[in-house]
């Protein structure tokens, strides 16, 4: 079966002839702004593997950028979606109540580590929609106009979330942007100011929040701070717990809501169902969680969950949408969560992460181009540099490694402010043999491209 196979390239070139023809048609028929640098045209996928139209087998360490934690084509999810499709595809939640929406909301309310005894859930379609609606909910509840976001952040491509996103390459020519969005420094400890200890650096990053209160907006006009437990596009940078505790303390002092953007880090990726469970264990749980990606195994769905007090404070009509909580997506999501809990995928993420991290750390002693290894669970970043002492980013090497891997049957993606981080987001159903095969391909790529 494909799900148990290993990478295998059977064509003399990648892309093969059939893939090459469809990639040419793509270039002629679709927007070039939606870029793809991979020579892959998928025919089918199972588990952590995909087969292209020419019969090549690829191991996927991108997983739809964190969408396929449960893998491709999980049979039980297919069955659940088929069963729902035989009843109805869609029922707009403003018009009719449908059971899947309610059951999924109840399940998420029981799982999420947000503050409060009773919780409520709102469904949208994408990560950007979840983040935007989380901000709308915070503003409506607090009656405050402004928010704080952080350096390195990625929150989406709507007008609001483009403004919230740090990297403005995603927003060229799109201004003017919404007002009232202020940016503090996210704790990128590998690149902390020279000479600072880790504690001094965390104090430095915390002070950048107070600087916003002094120079941009009074604290009593800030509705929320939006932060990723582990930055994705920013370079797979985990938020240090001591910094999160400080942010929580500032939020509590000034009546600011803390929003965890768990679009990429949710659903067992980091070794917990949600990464902010680590925060809750340290007594600094968020007020609101926005999540998406792996929630429904590839069907469009996102969620915003918060305590009842906050959700009940939202002005009617401010949030909503035609497709949010679509019946097919809810059926998939309910089955996703059932399987993740039953098959202990959070624990599996920890084991995968331990193996990958130990391997990466061993490479660090051999290859001087490896600067930093970091992450949570099975969400791991490998930062490549030109020199381990100077830490000069090595995006050029990443640009060679990614296509080398693809030519040898491994799909891997870059990330980071300097485009010099290789991200690990393999489906959590990856086999041990597939993981070993992928690590061998990646090591060969680094060795041959450096």
Image (cartoon, helix red, strand yellow):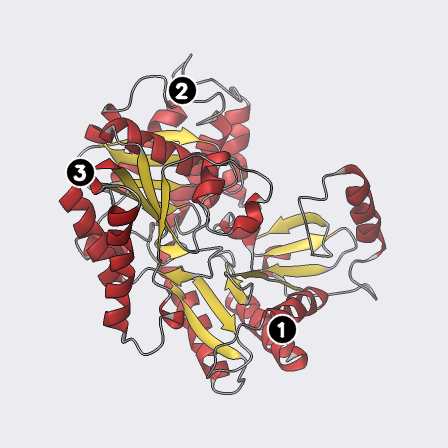
Q: Which residue, as the protein is rendered here, is positioned at the far left?
A: 253
Of labels 1 and 2, earlier in sequence is 2
Compared to 240, does 111 lie above or below? above
Quadrant where the N terminus is found in the figure? bottom right
Where does residue 129 sit, x and y in percent of width and height? Answer: 45, 34
Total residue callouts: 3
Report helix, strand or loop for mark 2.
loop
Where does residue 363 sit, x and y in percent of width and height? Answer: 50, 82
Reading the image, the residue beneath label 3 is: 116
Report helix, strand or loop for mark 1.
helix
Q: Which of the two marks, 3 or 2, is nearer to us in this view? A: 3
Residue at image location 47% in from the left, 86% down from the top: 365
Residue at image location 40% in from the left, 38% down from the top: 131
Query: How many other residues sit within 10 Å of disc 2, few (<14), some (14-19) or many (≥20)?
Result: some
Quadrant where the C terminus is found in the figure? bottom right
Q: Which of the two marks, 1 or 3, is nearer to us in this view? A: 1
Of labels 3 and 2, earlier in sequence is 2
- Judge left or right: residue 41 versus residue 309: right
- Judge left or right: residue 371 versus residue 62: left
Compared to 373, does 327 lie above or below? above
Q: Which of the two marks, 1 or 2, is nearer to us in this view? A: 1
As measured in the structure, the alpha-carbon distance from the residue carrying label 1 to the one carrying label 2 is 51 Å
Q: Is residue 92 visible?
A: yes
Residue 397 is tagged as: 1
As measured in the structure, the alpha-carbon distance from the residue carrying label 3 to the one carrying label 2 is 26 Å
Residue in the foreground of this view, choosing between 157 and 81: 157
Residue in the foreground of this view, choosing between 175 and 227: 175
Reading the image, the residue beneath label 2 is: 98
Where does residue 94 sit, x and y in percent of width and height? Answer: 40, 15
């Amino acid at each position: 079966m494909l799900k148990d196979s290993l990478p295998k390239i059977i064509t003399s070139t990648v892309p093969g002839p059939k893939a090459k023809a469809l990639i040419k048609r793509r270039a002629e028929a679709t927007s070039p702004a939606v870029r793809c640098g991979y020579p892959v045209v998928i025919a089918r996928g199972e588990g952590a593997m995909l087969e292209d139209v020419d019969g090549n087998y690829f191991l996927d360490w991108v997983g739809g950028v964190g969408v396929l934690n449960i893998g491709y084509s999980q049979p039980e999810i297919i069955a659940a979606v088929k069963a729902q499709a035989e009843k109805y595809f869609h029922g707009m939640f403003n018009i009719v109540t449908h059971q899947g929406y309610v059951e999924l909301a109840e399940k998420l309310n029981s799982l999420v580590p947000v503050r409060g005894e009773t919780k409520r859930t709102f469904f949208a379609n994408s990560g950007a929609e979840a983040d935007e609606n989380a901000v709308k909910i915070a503003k409506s509840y607090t009656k405050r106009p402004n928010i704080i976001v952080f350096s390195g952040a990625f929150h989406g491509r709507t007008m609001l979330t483009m403004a919230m996103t740090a990297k403005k390459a995603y927003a060229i020519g799109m201004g003017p942007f919404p007002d009232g969005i202020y940016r503090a420094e996210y704790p990128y400890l590998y690149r902390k100011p020279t000479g600072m200890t880790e504690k001094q650096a965390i104090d430095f990053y915390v002070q950048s929040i107070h600087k916003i209160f002094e120079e941009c907006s009074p604290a009593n006009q800030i509705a929320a701070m939006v932060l990723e437990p582990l930055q994705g596009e920013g370079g797979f940078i985990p938020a240090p717990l001591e910094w999160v505790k400080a942010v929580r303390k500032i939020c509590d002092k000034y009546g600011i809501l803390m929003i965890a953007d768990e679009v990429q880090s949710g659903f067992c990726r980091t070794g917990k169902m949600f990464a902010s469970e680590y925060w809750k264990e340290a007594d600094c749980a968020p007020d609101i969680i926005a999540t998406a990606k792996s929630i429904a195994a590839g069907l469009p769905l996102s969620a915003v969950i918060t305590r009842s007090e906050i959700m009940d404070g939202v002005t009617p009509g401010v949030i909503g949408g035609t497709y949010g909580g679509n019946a097919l997506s809810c059926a998939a999501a309910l089955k996703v969560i059932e399987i993740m809990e039953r098959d202990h995928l959070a624990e599996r993420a920890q084991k995968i992460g331990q193996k990958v991290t130990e391997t990466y750390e061993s490479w660090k002693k051999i290859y001087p181009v490896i600067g930093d290894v970091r992450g949570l669970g099975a969400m791991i970043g490998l930062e490549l540099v030109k020199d381990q002492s100077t830490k000069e980013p090595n995006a050029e090497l990443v640009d060679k490694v990614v296509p080398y891997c693809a030519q040898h049957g491994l799909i891997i993606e870059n990330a980071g402010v300097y485009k010099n981080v290789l991200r690990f987001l393999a489906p959590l159903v990856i086999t041990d043999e597939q993981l070993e095969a992928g690590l061998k391909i990646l090591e060969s790529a680094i060795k041959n491209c450096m």
